[in-house]
Each structure stands twice: as C-alpha cells, then as structure tokens.
Amino acid sequence: MGKATKLSATSTSTPQPYDVTFAYAGAPPNATVLQLICFRLSVTVAGNFAASVGHCGGNPTSAAVYTVYKNGSVIGSVTVSTGGAFAFATTGGASVSFVAGDTLSVLTPVSDATLSSVTITFAGTR
C-alpha cells in the first residue's frame, strides 16, 4: 500500500490588476460628468494614481484638468498639459479604495478649442 500524503493549500493574496478606463471621442463637453462607474468588486488605486496612463488626440491650448470623484467627493485630478503629457494626483497623494457599490466619476475640464479624444486608464488592483 502507498503512503498517504497530506497536502495543504496555502492561499496567497496577490493583488490582481484591475484597470478602469475613461474615454471620450472628439471634444469633451464643458464641465460635464462623463464617466460614472459603479464598482462590483473591491478595487484600490495607488497614491497619485501611480501606473495610470492617458492619451489625447488633440493637445489642449492650456492645461486641461479632469476632476475625479468617489461617491461624489473629490479624490484627485488628471491634468493634460499643452504638450499632451498627463499628470495624475490623488488628494494628499493617498491611495483610494473602492468597495462594491462605490462610484467613480470624471468631470471634464472647461471647454478647450483643441483638446480632443481623451483616454484615461486608471491602474488599480483587486
């Protein structure tokens, strides 16, 4: 007869990537909430939205600031420079956690004649 071997499963809780993408083709409307996401899972974004990325089809004539909200409260911003570079900031540089039912929304900047086709991907983990 063979010898019985006891196997034990060890669960490691390695964070998995979870991206949240905001995109708008064309010129964004003036100061309008365009993205509203209701989370189904718990997700955390790192301080200053680390590892998040952005792209625009047309650079703004002056810096364009998108305001980011969690459940209606400001948690940060995304600034697009006249050169098309994206700068991400969270309030106090802190990470932000979402749980099921929380919302994330993005408010567009004041109208800009040349800003267009903006895509922002927030890098999170779950």
Image: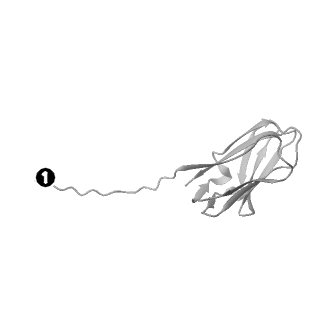
**Residue at x 42%, y 55% (from the top left corner):** 12
**Rendered view: 110 above or below 84:** below
Q: Quadrant of residue 10?
A: bottom left
Q: On the picture, is 118 further left or further right than 102?
A: right
Q: Which is nearer the eye, 76 or 43?
A: 43
**Residue at x 46%, y 56% (from the top left corner):** 13
Q: Which is nearer the eye, 36 or 8?
A: 36
**Residue at x 83%, y 42% (from the top left corner):** 27
| Residue 29, image x, y percentages | 85, 48
Q: Quadrant of the C terminus?
A: bottom right
Q: Identify the amino acid type marked 1.
A: Gly
The residue lying furthest to the left in this view is 1
Query: By what rule are the colours in the image chosen?
Result: one colour
> Circle 1: is it few (<14), some (14-19), or many (20+) Cα within 10 Å?
few
**Residue at x 63%, y 64% (from the top left corner):** 101
Query: Total number of numbered labels?
Result: 1
Q: Which residue is mark 1?
A: 2
| Residue 18, image x, y percentages | 58, 50
**Rendered view: 17 above or below 84:** below
Q: Secondary structure at mark 1?
A: loop
**Rendered view: 3 above or below 63:** below
Q: Quadrant of residue 91?
A: bottom right
| Residue 30, image x, y percentages | 87, 50
